[in-house]
C-alpha cells in the first residue's frame, strides 16, 4: 500500500516501540486518528462558522469551548490555537519586542525562540546553565543586571523553557519569573515539552505567556500548538485589526492581527481537540510515566561505563545518556561501527535513537506501558551482554 506515487505508508509506531525524543508526546490517539480522517479537508471546521467569523468562536464543532478548556488546562485566562509553539513565540515577540530591544533567552532556548526574536529585530542575551545543567534564578538575575547596565535598558521579554530539549531537565520557572517580574520583564514559559505531558499551572509559575506544542506534546497532528496568556496581556497580544482598504473602505471585523485571523482550520484543531480528554487524563498519570522512564535509565546505568547526563532521578522522560565508555567501546570494534546500537535495537523491535550515535544520545520513552518499559530496559541490557559489556545487578 502507498499514498500515491512515491509516498509510502509510514509504519514506525505500528512496527516498533519508538523512543524518538521529539515524537513521543505527539503520537495520535485513536480519536485523533478518526478526526484526521473525518476532518482532512481544508476548511473542514468552517461549515457552521457564524458571526463574528473567527475560529475561536465556532460553536459546532465546539472550538469555542475548547479554547476555554485550553486556557483552564494551563491555568491562564485566554488561549488561542497556533500552528506550532514557534508561532506562539512569534506572536509574543512581534507584540512585545521592538527593534533593538534586548531579549533574554537561555543556553537551552530552542532555535525557534531565537528566530522569533530575530524577526522582531530584538537582540538576544543568553543565560547560561549551572554545572547541573539547570538555569537558575540567580543566573537570570545576574544577566538582567548586566544587560540593563551595558545597554541602559532592561530586557523587553524573557524566554524560559520549563523543560529543555537538550537534557530534558526541569527548570525553576517560578523562581525565574519572580526575579524577572522584579524588573518588570514579562515571562514566556516555553511548555513545548510539558503542556500535555505533565501538569502545568501558568499562574502558579508566574508566567505571562504559556506556549505549548500540539504535535510535540498534545497527541495532535502538525502544525498545532497553543498560546495562553493572562487578562493583563490578552488585549495587546490578541489585538484586533484596525486596517482599512483605502479604495473600498473595507475593514475586517474582529480578526486578530497576530493570529492572522484564523489559525487551525481543519485536521489540526480537530485532532488536538479529539485527543484533549486523553491528554488531560495522561498528565494526571505523570508519575507512572516517570517511573517507567527511571526504570529504563536504571537498566542503562547498570551497564558499566554508562552515565545519565540529565538530572536524576528523572523528572521528565526526555533523557540524555552518555555511553562513551560502554556502547561506544563496542562501536570502535564492531563491524557495523556506531550503527550497531540502533541496528541491535531494531532487531528487537525498538527504534528512534539517532543512527550511528553511541557516545551521547537522547531517548524519550513517554507513553510506553509498564510491560513495554520493562522490555526496553531488558533489551538494552541484553544488547550490552551480547556485546560483552559487564552489567552489575542493582
Ligand atoms: C520542539 C520545540 C519547539 C518547537 O515546537 P513547534 O511546536 O514545532 O513549533 C520549541 N521549543 C522547544 C523547547 C522545543 O523542544
Image (spheres, helix red, strand yellow):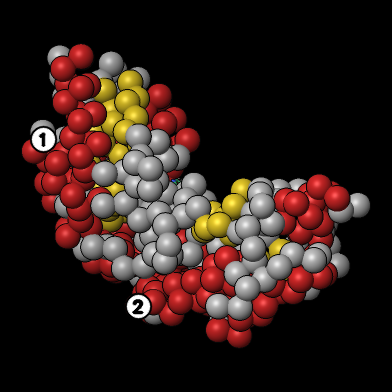
Q: With 183 as the anchor, is 337 left or right in this view?
A: right
Residue at image position (22%, 21%) is: 147
Q: Residues within 10 Å of mark 2 (few under 14, many from 20)?
A: few
Pinpoint residue 254: horizontal percent, then vertical percent: 25, 44
* Residue at (42, 57) in percent of width and height: 311
Disc 2: residue Cβ within 8 A of ligand 1's nearest atom: no
Disc 2 is placed on an element classified as: helix
Relative to 116, 40 lies left or right: right
Residue 116: give x, y in percent of width and height: 40, 32
**Quadrant occupied by the C terminus:** bottom right
- For label 1, count other residues whose C-alpha is less than 10 Å away and answer few (under 14), some (14-19) or many (20+): some
Residue at 20% across, 39% down: 138
State yes or no: Cβ of the residue under disc 1 lies below 8 Å from any atom of ligand 1.
Answer: no
| Residue nearer the viewer, 8 or 367 | 367
- Residue most extreme to the bottom: 371
Does residue 225 show up? no
Residue at the limit of the structure toward the left, as seen here? 182
Quadrant of the image containing the N terminus: bottom right
Q: Earlier in the sequence, mark 2 or mark 1?
A: 1
Tag shown at residue 284: 2
Kindly indicate the quadrant of the structure image that contains residue 72.
Answer: bottom left
Res 256 label: none
The dot on residue 184 is: 1
Q: Quadrant of residue 182?
A: top left
Count of residue discs: 2
Amino acid at each position: 500500500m502507498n499514498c500515491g506515487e512515491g509516498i509510502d505508508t509510514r509504519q514506525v509506531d505500528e512496527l516498533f516501540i519508538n523512543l524518538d525524543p521529539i515524537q513521543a508526546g505527539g503520537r495520535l490517539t485513536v480519536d485523533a486518528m478518526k478526526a484526521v480522517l473525518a476532518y482532512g479537508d481544508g476548511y473542514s471546521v468552517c461549515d457552521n462558522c457564524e458571526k463574528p467569523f473567527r475560529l475561536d468562536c465556532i460553536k459546532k464543532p465546539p472550538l469555542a469551548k475548547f479554547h476555554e478548556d485550553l486556557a483552564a488546562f494551563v491555568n491562564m485566562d485566554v488561549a488561542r490555537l497556533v500552528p506550532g509553539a514557534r508561532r506562539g513565540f512569534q506572536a509574543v515577540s512581534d507584540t512585545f519586542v521592538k527593534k533593538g530591544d534586548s531579549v533574554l533567552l537561555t543556553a537551552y532556548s530552542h532555535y525557534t525562540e531565537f528566530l522569533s526574536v530575530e524577526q522582531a529585530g530584538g537582540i538576544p542575551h543568553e543565560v547560561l546553565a549551572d554545572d547541573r545543567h539547570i538555569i537558575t534564578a540567580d543566573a537570570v538575575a545576574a544577566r538582567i543586571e548586566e544587560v540593563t547596565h551595558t545597554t541602559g535598558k532592561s530586557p523587553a521579554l524573557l524566554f524560559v523553557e520549563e523543560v529543555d530539549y537538550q537534557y530534558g531537565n526541569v527548570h525553576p520557572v517560578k523562581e525565574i519569573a519572580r526575579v524577572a517580574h522584579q524588573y518588570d520583564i514579562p515571562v514566556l514559559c516555553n511548555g513545548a515539552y510539558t503542556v500535555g505531558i505533565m501538569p502545568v499551572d501558568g499562574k502558579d509559575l508566574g508566567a505571562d505567556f504559556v506556549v505549548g506544542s500540539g504535535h510535540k506534546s498534545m497527541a495532535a497532528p502538525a502544525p498545532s500548538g497553543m498560546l495562553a496568556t493572562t487578562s493583563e496581556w490578552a488585549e495587546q497580544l490578541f489585538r484586533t485589526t484596525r486596517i482599512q482598504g483605502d479604495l473600498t473602505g473595507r475593514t475586517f471585523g474582529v480578526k486578530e492581527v497576530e493570529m492572522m485571523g484564523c489559525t487551525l482550520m481543519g485536521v489540526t484543531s480537530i485532532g488536538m481537540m479529539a485527543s484533549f480528554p486523553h491528554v488531560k487524563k495522561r498528565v494526571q498519570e505523570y508519575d507512572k510515566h516517570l517511573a517507567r522512564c527511571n526504570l529504563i535509565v536504571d537498566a542503562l546505568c547498570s551497564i558499566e561505563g554508562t552515565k545519565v547526563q540529565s538530572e536524576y532521578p528523572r523528572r521528565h522522560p526526555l533523557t540524555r545518556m552518555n555511553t562513551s565508555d560502554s556502547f561506544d567501546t563496542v562501536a570502535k570494534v564492531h563491524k557495523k561501527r556506531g550503527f550497531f546500537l540502533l541496528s541491535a535495537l531494531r532487531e528487537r523491535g525498538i527504534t528512534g535513537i539517532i543512527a550511528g550515535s553511541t557516545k551521547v544520545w537522547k531517548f524519550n520513552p513517554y507513553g510506553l506501558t509498564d510491560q513495554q518499559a520493562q522490555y526496553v530496559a531488558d533489551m538494552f541490557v541484553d544488547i550490552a551482554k551480547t556485546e560483552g559489556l559487564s552489567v552489575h545487578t542493582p
